[in-house]
Every structure is written in C-alpha cells, then in structure tokens.
Amino acid sequence: MQCPPVLFVIYRRPETTRRVFEAIRQARPAKLFISQDAPRPGHPEQLAAHKEAREIALAVDWPCEVHTQFFETYQGIIPGFTAAFRWFFDTVEEGIMLEDDQVPDSTYFRFCAEMLEKYRHDDRIMSISGSNVLEYYTEPYRRDSYYFLSIPCVWGLATWRRAWKHYDPNITQWPEVRDSKLLYKALPSSAAAFYFSQKFQGYYERKINSYDGQWAFACLANKGLSIYPTRNLISNIGINAAGAFHATTSDPLWGDVPTELMPFPLVHPPKVEVNNVWDEYGVRIRYRRVDFGWFQKMKWALKSSFPDAYLAVKRFFYKTVLPKRFAEYNHEEERSLLP
C-alpha cells in the first residue's frame, strides 16, 4: 500500500530531524511537505542548526513530489502549525504529520494508510495516532490491532481534510461548549471534564502556547473518535530537549518509548465505539491531575455535587482569610467550568 502524503514539521534540531527523516525515506512517500518556521529574532547562535535541519529534510533521493513552506519571519507555535496544516490540506485530502522528534516504526506508515482508507468517509473518526496510550495497562487489550478513545494525540498524527476543517486555533466555540456541559458527557469522568474545561479556558484566553489542545477541543466538540494502535508506533525523542518547539510537562513514561512492529493483516475492532474503561485509564495516565488520591476524591465529590455551596464557602474563606487571593478569584469563571 502506498505511503500517504507526509507533512514534516521541522525547526532547528538536526539530530532528531535526521532520525525522523530516515524513517520517512524508508517509507518513500510520493508527496512530502516540509514546513519550517523562521529562526527566533535575536538568536544568531541558532542559525547553523536551523540551516542544517533544513538541509537534512531536503535530501530527498527517491521519486517524490516535494513541497516546501519556509517562513521568512518567525511565526511561533500556534500560527506556524496552523499555517502548516492549512497549507497541507489545501493540497491533499488526507495525510500524516510528523514533527522533528517523532520517530515512527517502519509499520507506522502502512497502519496509517489502512486507517485513512478504511475510515475515509466515516465522520465519526477524526484522528489517528501512532502512540499506544495503553502501554502500561495491566489487562490484555491486544485482541484487535487498534482501539478508539475520546481524546486525540498528535504524536504521529494522521487525519483527513474533512476532519481538520473543524480545527480552530482560537477555539471560538468554547463558551458554547462550556455552557452546554458537553465535556461532562463526552469524557470518562467529571474530574477529566473539569480538567479539560480549565485547559480549554486557558486556550480561549490565549494563556497556553500550544497547538495540540485545540485539536483535542475540535474532536471533543464534534464528538469525534480517535484511533490508537495496540502497538506503540511512535517514539518521541524530543521531550524537553534543547531546540524543541516548546517544553512539555508530559510524564517521563512517555519519553523515548520503544516502538514495536504492527502485525498485518490488521484485526479490526467489531464496533466503532470508545471502551470507557480504557478511555478513563488513558486520561488518568496521560493527565495525572485527574488521578486523585482519597482526600482529593472527597473534595471533588463535594465540589462537583454541590458546586454553588462549595464556591460560596470558598469565596467566604478567601474573603476573610486570604483577601489577596479573594481579589484575584474569579467565582463566575470557576462556576462555569463545573458541572
């Protein structure tokens, strides 16, 4: 099966870029799109690495239609990635996106090609990942070759133009989604819904400088499912590395995880639906702030079951004991994020 078109987003990490590019070279896509942001102003010491990364990505030695998007001025994470995806999907209907630190297994490309073809016209499916978030799950789950979860992962992302059209870097729909309490219906726990409500509020207020949370919002707001392989097909070798687009607070369990070969032919799940147990596990292990201890669980039970009473007590406590905190406290915003 032919490798789908690949969008390769690079910056200034020659060593990681070389490893990802070698995997792309082995897959020999017929169409390769290379996007690179301009260097940050005022950092001449970064120019050599920036140039070297570009030279590596351009060393295409197989029959391939190469497209390039090299920015002349620094864009930053959100505008840069948004422009790269828009440029990519203006040309192709479906494809793969790899960042310069996401090293794919050799079977990753065939897996994505089969998933893109099988679910091409299924609007229920919005995202395909190369990562296996059940890596540390203690129960057998490998009967099938992949499974469905509610929240996407952009490590080894593959998707379609029909799905990416819902991506909005400013998540302008957030107030409507927030007030409808949709996340409390879409996510496996109310703690997860509150956590993501806080995150999306931060994206909406431009307080978080990342592009992937907006993709999670697009999938959740449109009730889209995300495909994950039961073998890990992507190894992220750039967590907190020098030259990364941005540092991450991801759990160290996810850095540089070894990849596995995906057996073929693929074994498809009997139903297109989320396994709620796996979904909850996937959220807890990736986002540790929703994995409460017993005291936090008691506090959350009170907070979510009686939000108005809880917030009234909190306001009184701040006002009488912590007046500085009270002056900064936004009661209406926190209430809007609770059930």
Image (cartoon, rainbow, N blue to C red):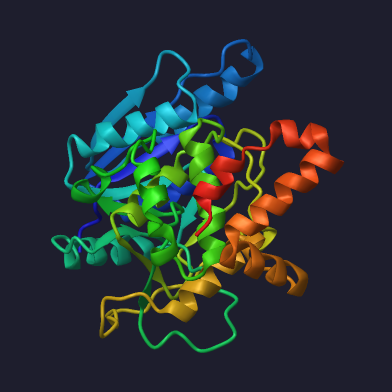
Image height of 2 relative to 21, above or below = below
Q: Which residue is the extreme one toward the right?
A: 321
Res 65 visible: yes
| Horizontal arrangement in the rendering, residue 320 relative to residue 65 (left or right) | right
Q: Is residue 125 above or below residue 178?
A: below
At 48% from the left and 69% from the top, the residue drawn is 132
Left or right of 120? Residue 214 is right
Q: Quadrant of residue 254?
A: bottom right
Kindly identify the residue that appears in the image at 51 percent across and 53 percent down.
Answer: 196
Quarter of the picture containing the N terminus is bottom left
Residue 231 at x, y percent in the picture: 46, 74
The residue at 18%/49% (across/down) is 162
Closer to the camera in the image, 242 or 191: 191
Residue 239: x, y in percent? 63, 48
Q: Nearer the viewer, residue 337 or 60?
A: 337
| Vertical arrangement, residue 339 with respect to residue 335, above or below | below
Q: Quadrant of residue 263?
A: bottom left
Q: Residue furthest left?
A: 121
Name the residue furthest top: 42
Q: Report x, y in % for residue 171.
A: 38, 38
Residue 202 on image: x %, y %: 54, 38
